[in-house]
Image (cartoon, grey):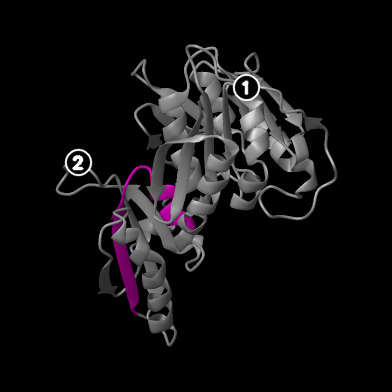
Amino acid sequence: MSWIELSLDTTNEAVDWVYTLLAKAIAAKDLHISEYAENGKNHEKWKFTIQMFLPEDARIHQRLDEIEKILTPLHRTGMTSELQTFVVDQKPNHLDTDKTSANSLIRRIGDRFVILSTDSDYQSSDSQEIVLRLQNSLAFGSGLHPATILSLRLLERYISPKLYTLDLGSGSGILSVAMAKLGAEVLAIDNDRTAVNATQDAVERNQVNQQVIVREASLGSASKLGHWMGGDSVEPVPAIIANQQFDLIVANIFARVHISLAAEFYQALRSIDFHSGILITAGYTSDRADDVTSAMTEAGFALGDRLQIDEWIAIAFVKP
């Protein structure tokens, strides 16, 4: 039987997201990741190559169409190179024993963050790098979803040492750990027990216990809104009263929750002489950006930075 080999190159930040999307159409055993190499040279943009192998059977054209549909918006936004297609007589034998996977890669986000799996033996030689070690979990944010990447980029811009911060909907804990390693004090809350456990694990794994408190809780009326990421409903959890206590809030959750909590976000942030309160919103797509922005400006926020990957948006708002 002949095989169709598909190949594309992708960026350091996008590789996890590209791999996750492709895994919906292709079995993991037929997806292979390697470090990008063109005649042994590095590329200023492409860092990884993803190869896919499909049997040339009666379904091949349907499957190719599915993959093309997945990849077109990624290529259009610069996350991947063009898809290359070849016909081969057989899969290379070495790929059957290749242990490279999305979880063993070293991901670099922004200027300083390095994301590693728990078992990675990577040792940083750069004192400016901030290493975050995570394990896979069932909580949203376990992989490097675009919303997570955008949140990390904005946190790198806005976090400074000693700020008191809130991670609302902490998920895997990656944002809480990132803020702590940037020097902030963090209250990490989620209304999902799986997410709370995942955050606590990430805090302990990264040895930031002294800076991060993890609680099963909500902010104000958020406990009445159900699961923040749209899953099954959750039992009511303790509510934290919004009382101008935080210097920065990051919330990687659905747009409807951002909109519902706009006034309470404003009330929960404090602005002092040397620092304006910052709200970083993520977890929604460009079709909801105007709705979120309108809700925040009506609550009193000024518009700050806006970042985008594919259709995913993250916006920072400032409390004057």
Magenta residue check for 7: yes
Q: Position of residue 93 (x, y in %)?
A: 36, 61
- Residue 266 figure quarter: top right
Q: Mark 2: few, some, or many residues within 10 Å (few <14, many ≥20)? A: few
Residue 320 appears in the figure:
yes
Residue 99 appears in the figure:
no
Seen from the viewer's position, the closer of residues 33 and 131 is: 131
**Quarter of the image that includes the N terminus:** bottom left
Q: Where is residue 130 in the image (x, y as percent from the top left)?
A: 43, 23
Q: How far apart are marks 1 and 2 (CA)?
A: 43 Å
Residue at 49%, 17% (x, y): give it.
Answer: 275
Q: What stretch is highlighted in magenta?
A: 2-20
Residue at 34%, 75% (x, y): give it.
Answer: 3
Instruction: Give residue 231's mark.
Output: none
**Disc 2 residue type?**
Asn
Q: Position of residue 73 (x, y in %)?
A: 36, 63
Q: Name the residue under label 1.
A: 246
**Disc 1 residue type?**
Phe
Say which of marks 1 and 2 sits in front. Answer: 1
Q: Mark 2 points at which residue?
A: 42
Seen from the viewer's position, the closer of residues 163 and 293 is: 293
Question: Helix or strand or loop: what does disc 2 sit on?
Answer: loop
Q: State which tag comes first along the sequence, 1 or 2.
A: 2
Residue at the extreme bottom of the image, as rendered: 58
Residue at 69%, 40% (x, y): give it.
Answer: 195
Residue at 36%, 15% (x, y): give it.
Answer: 127
Left or right, 6 with reference to 166: left
Q: Mark 1: few, some, or many residues within 10 Å (few <14, many ≥20)? A: many
Please give the count of numbered marks on the rendered protein. Answer: 2
Seen from the viewer's position, the closer of residues 84 and 295 is: 295
Left or right, 38 with reference to 143: left
- Residue 107 figure quarter: top left
